[in-house]
Amino acid sequence: MGDGWHFYVLRTRASALYAGVTNDVARRVAAHEAGRGAKALRARGPLCLVFCVPIGNRTLALRVEDRFQRLPKARKEEIVSTQPTGAALLARLGLPARAKQRAMG
């Protein structure tokens, strides 16, 4: 899924959402599915990648993950259903405009 850092969201068998960041989405999802990823996902499969967007650098990706995790489930579901671009996601999460320019440009 390209170079740089990505923000991604997985859905578990019980419809719970799990957010993460990585610089290799395919490798990270495979690790989660094999039980080598986050402990929170072990025995929660099958997992489905429901959202993935390039963010830019690792620092910004971690900030996006933190902001997303603090949202109520309804807002998380709205983001997953609308599939915003990286810039639109940053705006929705209230991250500064200058961060968008550095990350996306």
Image: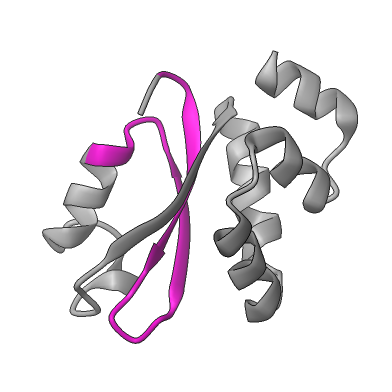
Verify whether residue 9 appears in magenta. yes
- Classify the position of the C terminus by image quarter: top right
Q: Residue at x 58, y 25 (%)?
A: 57
Residue 37 left/right relative to 3: left
Q: Residue at x 80, y 51 (%)?
A: 92
Q: Is residue 6 magenta?
A: yes
Which region shows up in magenta?
A: 3-26
Q: Residue at x 17, y 49 (%)?
A: 30
Colouring scheme applied when the structure was drawn: one colour
Specify the quadrant that holds the N terminus: top left
Can you name the residue that lies furthest to the bottom here? 14
Q: Residue furthest front?
A: 82
- Residue ranking furthest to the left: 34
Could you tell whether 40 is left or right of 37 in the image? right
Front one among 13 and 62: 13
Res 58 → quadrant: top right
Vertical placement of residue 93 versus 85, above or below: below
- Give whichever of 89, 67 is nearer the camera: 89
Q: Residue at x 71, y 57 (%)?
A: 67
Residue 88, how many percent across, how many down?
74, 41
**Where does residue 82 sit, x and y in percent of width and height?**
62, 57
What x and y, as percent, mark residue 69? 62, 65
Horizontally, is 97 left or right of 56 in the view?
Answer: right
Q: Closest to the observer: 77 or 20?
A: 77
Q: Please say if 7 is above or below 44.
A: above
Q: How many marks?
A: 0
Residue 14 pos. (x, y %): 34, 86
